[in-house]
Amino acid sequence: MKFSALILVPALSLLAGCFSGLNSKAAPEQRYLLQSEIVKPALEAQPAGTVQVLRPSASPGVAGSRIAVVRSGARVDYYANARWVEETPPLLQSKIIDALRTGGRFATVESDTEPFAAQYLLSVDIANFQAKYIDAGAPTVFVTLNCTLGRRTDRSVIVSFAAQGTAHASADHLEAVVAAFGAATSQALQQIAENIAPPAADQRVK
């Protein structure tokens, strides 16, 4: 029994070393930030009202944290070993909140996790948030955010429109595609900052 035990221990150690070696060959997963930037729009009225940005809804293809790409034949795929820092709905929710705050049309902009009851609600549906190979070469990124601003009290719609952005990647590699996502998202966020505002009757003219 002592002789068998001495043989068994090195065998287990060797087996563990083999598995460790196999795991070390796997490419590490990369997490990417979504970089966006908007220009503060010119304001003709003082900030007014409070708005809550609801967590956006999204189709299953773009609802997770994986970076989606559409290839030939309308086949949805994902870039290997690459993800956004969080799932797409909360990722874009925080970007929309930042855009509305930069836009300066509301006195207060919060997420739907805050305990305060806002006057207005902004719902967003993520219709497009993927790269697409159209021709040979680098892909083009498409972002479409269907936005609806309404009153909390009676759920009446104030404004509804699609904020859209497109950007062609400078090269067919992931870093360039991620940069194109940022550029396309910036275009859509700029439209949100310029078009989402309280009704004119609720704004105090300077």
Image: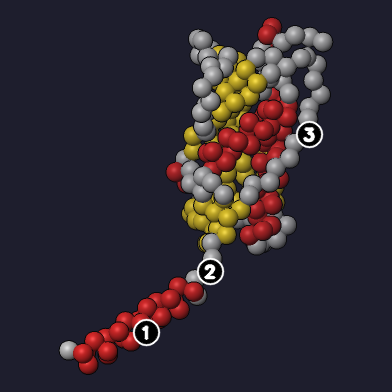
- The three-letter code of the residue at mark 3 reads Val
In the image, residue 57 lies at what x, y percent? 49, 34
Question: Pointer 2: what residue?
Answer: 27
Q: Nearer the viewer, residue 18 or 120?
A: 18
Q: Is residue 119 above or below residue 137?
A: above
Residue at position x 56%, y 28% in the image: 111
In the image, residue 128 lies at what x, y percent? 56, 41
Q: Report the residue that reaches farthest toward the left.
A: 1
The quadrant in which residue 196 appears is top right
Q: Report the residue that reaches farthest toward the top.
A: 201
- The three-letter code of the residue at mark 2 reads Ala
Question: Pointer 1: what residue?
Answer: 14
Q: Secondary structure at mark 2?
A: loop
Q: Nearer the viewer, residue 206 or 192?
A: 206
Q: Which mark is residue 39?
A: 3
Instruction: Tell which tag, 1 or 2, sits nearer the viewer.
Output: 1
Q: CA distance from mark 1 to mark 2?
A: 23 Å
- The three-letter code of the residue at mark 1 reads Leu
Residue 96 in sight from this viewpoint: yes
Instruction: Tell which tag, 3 or 1, sits nearer the viewer.
Output: 1
Q: Quadrant of the C terminus?
A: top right
